[in-house]
Amino acid sequence: MTLSQPSYEALTEHTAITLAKKLELFDSNADLVCHEIGDGNLNMVFRITEPAAQRGIIIKQALPYVRVIGEGWPLTLNRAVIESEALRHFAKHVPQFVPEIYYTDAAYAITVMEDLSHLTIVRTGLASGSTYPLLSTHIGEFLAKTLFATSDFAMGPQEKRELALQFHNPELCKITENFVFTYPLFDHETNDVEDILRPTAEALWNDQVLLLEAAKLKQTFMTHAEALLHGDLHTGSIFASDEETKVIDPEFAFYGPIGFDVGLFIANTLLSALAREESDRAALLFHITQVWDVFTITFSNLWRQNNVDDFAQVEGYLEYQLQHIWADAVGFAGSEIIRRIFGLAHARDIEAITEDAHRLAVKRNAAALGRDFIVNRSLYESPSQIVQALQQVVKG
Ligand code: SR1
Ligand code: MG
């Protein structure tokens, strides 16, 4: 490939090495190894290492279509720009929680970044028994700082609107609107429902109370431009170790409701907890309460120190905001849980349960929790009630 020629070309393992050398990220005579390691739904990811120097880089490239579907489903390359710009924004506020970006190329939809392979993807690690003791403390801080900093409260409405324009992301938002909020709640051809669970899915599809509340949540997602969201903060979008946490993949970033990012983290942590034996669940249930506790403390401190809104110090306004963010988060967690059970993109940790009866019970419990979170989101006053609901549903 030639970088001077500004027309898109998909990288191969060979041309990815050529690019890395051209960018002088390695010596021209270095012996490099490249593997395409992408296992997500959308993109290609090349890991290039120099074994002799024990160092590496990641080159991520967006394809002009959805990888898991193929060329029949075109998708904007601009998502690579959105992703790298979102990472740069997050780095202003929480550099410790995002990978370093070395180079971007909009025409090739390429982002070259720090290799995080000393860490593991959290969904994978949670499935194999890791607990990541600092995960929720780090994610709570990541969420509070990035979301507060890009809200009206920190930026003022004019500057915020300018930034929101940069993160106009209609094609990726449409994926979420369809695959998270809509299709899983109807008998849609893209859904993936185990035959034996069809009656459970059909009960949801015919549940008018659920559908009304799900519709309201989708409307909130589409219209409440509160802050710059990551937009897809499931546990597959986080690398971690016992000491370190890095958030990746914000290609779905856009201005949306703050509770969406919070809800996705809680939903996916809860699904991992459900997939575990009861005796191994405590560390994950801790993450559900801790992420919200850290978020509220950090967000509240930022509010008191940096809020530019004339109404900032009005008694009760911060509490009102936290209450609506929390209710949104509970509802969005419900939407995410249902889509991970009946939609196109399932939770790998649950699918990995080989014993049918166990896997089906986990899915039924998840579906029941998802429904309750959507319908009764305003009744959940704190994350400990989420934990209680999980404990009750598994007891039967
Ligand atoms: C068709 S893409 C489905 C999912 O993959 C991405 O990772 C997002 O989570 C999206 O909802
Ligand atoms: Mg992703």
Image (spheres, helix red, strand yellow):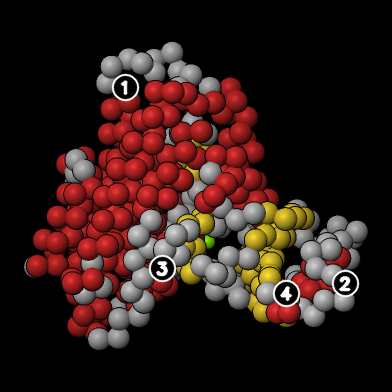
Kindly check if marks 4 and 3 are in contact, taking CB atoms under 8 A apart as contact. no
Residue 350 vs 337, above or below: the answer is below
> Of discs 4 and 3, which sits in the foreground?
4
Rendered residue at 51%/33% (across/down): 149
> Of discs 1 and 2, which sits in the foreground?
2
Residue 280 vs 234, above or below: the answer is below
Kindly check if marks 1 and 3 are in contact, taking CB atoms under 8 A apart as contact. no
Q: CA distance from mark 4 to mark 1?
A: 54 Å
| Left-right relation of 23 to 82 | right
> Of discs 4 and 1, which sits in the foreground?
4
| Left-right relation of 87 to 128 | right
Dividing the picture into quarters, in which one does residue 45 lie? bottom right
Residue 350 in the image, given as x and y percentages of width and height? 32, 74
Label 2 packing within 10 angstroms: few (<14), some (14-19), many (20+): few
Q: Earlier in the sequence, mark 4 or mark 3?
A: 4
Circle 3 is placed at which residue position? Answer: 123
**Residue 179 in sight here:** no
Amino acid carrying label 2: it is Ser
Q: Which mark is residue 53?
A: 4
Rendered residue at 72%/55% (across/down): 102
Q: Which mark is residue 317?
A: 1
Any atom of ligand 2 within 8 Å of the CB at mark 2? Answer: no
Circle 2 is placed at which residue position? Answer: 28
Circle 2 SS class: loop
Circle 1 SS class: helix
Residue 164 vs 80, above or below: the answer is above
